[in-house]
Image: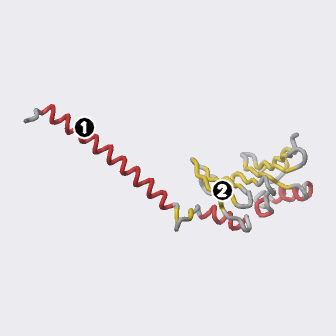
Amino acid sequence: MFLNCNQYFKIMNRLSLSLLLVGIGMIVALTTFASEEKNKNDGREVFPSKIESFVTENIPQGKIVKFKHENDKMEIKCNDGTEVCFNHNGEWIKMENDKTGLNAHLIAHLPNSAVLYLKNNYNKVAVSEVEKKSYGYKVELKTSPNECDIWFNSDGSVRKECDY
């Protein structure tokens, strides 16, 4: 049984396409496996060093219990209820703790004048959330019965306060 030229080329094209698809599948599988291995160390997840340093320096006794990396953002949740969202450079863009409020180390990331304003005007009120905005910062306070939001400019001056 002999093949003519057209039959031979059809078989070779199908075979080449099949080999190409198998090759692509193997590359994808190996790349996925390698990236998963890179993020694990002795069964423990390895976080970007900037994020690990942030937690160590700002959340005493803090232990990361959840880590999510999506698009250009990374989010962590710590055992004390603190959640921090970071941009692709590892810089915080949002911090929150609805359980107990943010600790003094985290609030200190605001400009000094904003920290002083909060201390002088809302000393006994927990700060539940701080978010970086294009103009500066949005701070959410746990006031009863409503929440109070204060917007600060990037220099720490008050932009707007408690919009009920």
Seen in the image, is 47 located left or right of residue 164?
Answer: left
Q: Are marks 2 and 1 in contact (CB under 8 Å)?
A: no
Q: How far apart in space, not on screen, are marks 2 and 1 (Cα)?
A: 48 Å
Q: Closer to the N terminus: mark 2 or mark 1? A: 1
- Judging by the rendered image, the residue that carries numbered circle 1 is 14
Seen in the image, is 109 located left or right of residue 45?
Answer: right
Q: Considering only vertical position in the picture, is 26 above or below 105? A: above
- Residue at image position (80%, 63%) is 104
Mark 2 Cα shell of 10 Å, populated few (<14), some (14-19), many (≥20): many
- Judging by the rendered image, the residue that carries numbered circle 2 is 76
Instruction: Assign a secondary structure to mark 2.
Output: strand
Q: Position of residue 163 (x, y in %)?
A: 86, 41
Q: Considering only vertical position in the picture, is 26 above or below 48? A: above
Instruction: Assign a secondary structure to mark 1.
Output: helix
Seen in the image, is 12 located left or right of residue 156?
Answer: left
User: Could you tell me the amino acid type at mark 2?
Assistant: Ile
- Residue at image position (85%, 49%) is 158
- Residue at image position (44%, 58%) is 34
- Residue at image position (88%, 49%) is 143
Q: Position of residue 70 (x, y in %)?
A: 58, 48
For the N terminus, which image quadrant?
top left
